[in-house]
Amino acid sequence: ILFSLQSAEVLEFVKKDFDELSTTVKTEATNVVQQTTTVFRETLQLDKPESTASSMKKSVSTFLDQVSTVLNPSPDDEDEEAVVIHGTDVVPLTRLQVGKAQLYALSNDPDTYLKEIEPELLPRYEAWLELLEEQGNKQLSNEKLIKMLVNNPQLQDNFQNLVPNQR
């Protein structure tokens, strides 16, 4: 029993010593960091724009921005043109031809007829409908629609596949 009481006392003293040591180390480390920070701040004068360190920081930042721009240039689409490869020939397209190609792709895509209009495109669609109504729907007359179907076999296929028969 005496041995266990002495062991408990020794353990209690060792625990207190460790607590004191850890508190001392933590306090001293905090003081060293604070003093080092103060010395760096006063020496480098990072908060002053005219300091050497601040100028160096700006120079390095500018250099890295320039390297980034050179390695990752922004795309410049103004000097590019759309082309179609026909066999081995490369045929440049005009803006009108690009528009026609987009219209052709849209007219051949069943989703054009099956999906709801996207919310961000809805105002443009409604404006188009108003324009058609103002013109008396001349753009969508039965004669013009029949002519479009006759002249565009893919559009006719979509019409036959997607529009139910009215019998």
Image (spheres, helix red, strand yellow):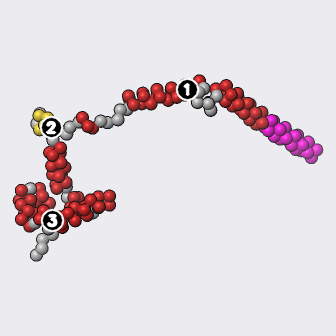
Residue 13 in the image: state x and y as whole percent: 87, 40
Secondary element under disc 3, as helix, strand or loop, is loop
Q: Quadrant of the C terminus?
A: bottom left
Residue 39 visible from this viewpoint: yes
First in sequence: mark 2 vs mark 3: 2
Q: Which residues are magenta?
A: 1-24
- Foreground residue, 82 or 20? 82
The residue identified by callout 3 is 135
Q: Is residue 51 above or below residue 117?
A: above
Task: Find the distance from the CA under tag 1 to the CA under tag 2.
Answer: 50 Å
| Residue 166 x %, y % | 12, 73
Give the quarter of the image for residue 4: top right
Residue in the image at 11% along x and 56% along y = 154
Q: Is residue 59 left or right of residue 131?
A: right
The residue carrying mark 1 is: 55
SS at mark 1?
helix
Residue located farthest toward the right when viewing the structure as drawn: 2
Relative placement, left or right, of 12 versus 118 is right
Residue wearing tag 2: 92
Magenta stretch holds residue 11:
yes
| Amino acid type indicated by mark 3 | Gln
- Residue that lies at the very extreme toward the bottom in this rendered image: 167
**Res 7 seen here:** no
Q: Residue at x 46, y 26 (%)?
A: 63
Q: Is residue 97 above or below residue 148?
A: above
Apparent side of residue 8 relative to residue 92 in the rendered image (left or right): right
Query: Tag 2, which secondary structure?
Result: strand
The residue mark sitting in front, 1 or 2, is 1
Circle 1/circle 2 CB separation < 8 Å: no
Tell me which numbered mark, 1 or 2, is placed earlier along the sequence.
1
